[in-house]
Amino acid sequence: MCEDEYEGFSEVRDEITLKRSPKEFGMKKIIYFDMDGTVADFYHVTDWLTRIRHDDASVYEEARPFDEYINMARYYKSIGYKVVIITCLPWYCSHDFGISVARAKGRWVYKYMPFIDSMLVVPHTHHKEAYAIDEGVLVDDDSRTLENWPWTKIKAINKGGRLWK
């Protein structure tokens, strides 16, 4: 498949200028995608924070997809990368709510990104590298998480969602 078949991807690709091969990165072919705010527009779900505080995990299933980053993931899958979602649970959630959130996020990923290789649901942290399967590229909208990622990183900027600078 050629990259033009992935609608919206060329704009993102040009924005991040990621045109190098994995060998140039000096790493295995793994690309990790954050979920909330990167591939899923979680922050525009009505009353998302209040609902999470009341243990409503359905918030995660209501997020609309950010097609540009989903198409980017699909493209990297097509050229041989292992595509992994690495996503956090909410801060200080109970064990039971954590399980509900992990299931809701899993249903969202199954609906919008069934082609991925793996999904890691981790405690809320800015140190996702501690949970990575192996070194790889991280696409994330959180600056603190990116600062801690020791390998190649890509700042996700979603025009339809929260704009991070």
Image: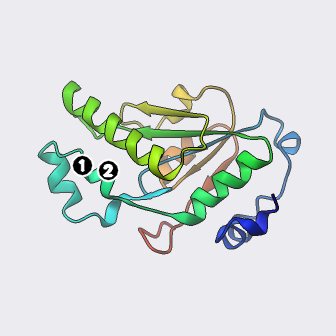
Left or right relative to 39: residue 9: right
What secondary structure is found at the residue carrying circle 2? helix
Nearest the camera: 9 or 90?
9
The residue lying at 77 percent from left, 69 percent from top is 4
The residue lying at 79 percent from left, 41 percent from top is 80
Q: Residues within 10 Å of mark 1 (few under 14, many from 20)?
A: some
- Looking at the rendered structure, the kind of residue marked 1 is Ser
The image position of residue 68, as x and y in percent, is 59, 65
- Looking at the rendered structure, the kind of residue marked 2 is Tyr
Which of the image's four quarters has the N terminus?
bottom right
The image quarter in which residue 157 lies: bottom right
Q: Is residue 34 above or below residue 12?
A: above
Per the rendering, the mark at residue 118 is none
Q: Residues within 10 Å of mark 2 (few under 14, many from 20)?
A: many
Residue that mark 1 sits on: 58
C-beta proximity under 8 Å, tags 2 and 1: yes
The residue lying at 22 percent from left, 66 percent from top is 46
The residue lying at 73 percent from left, 50 percent from top is 76
Per the rendering, the mark at residue 60 is 2
Nearest the camera: 98 or 155?
98
Left or right relative to 71: residue 95: left
> Gap in Å between the C-alphas at discs 2 and 1?
5 Å
Q: Is residue 91 above or below residue 58?
A: above
The image position of residue 30, as x and y in percent, is 70, 37
Asked which colour scheme the image uses, the reply is rainbow
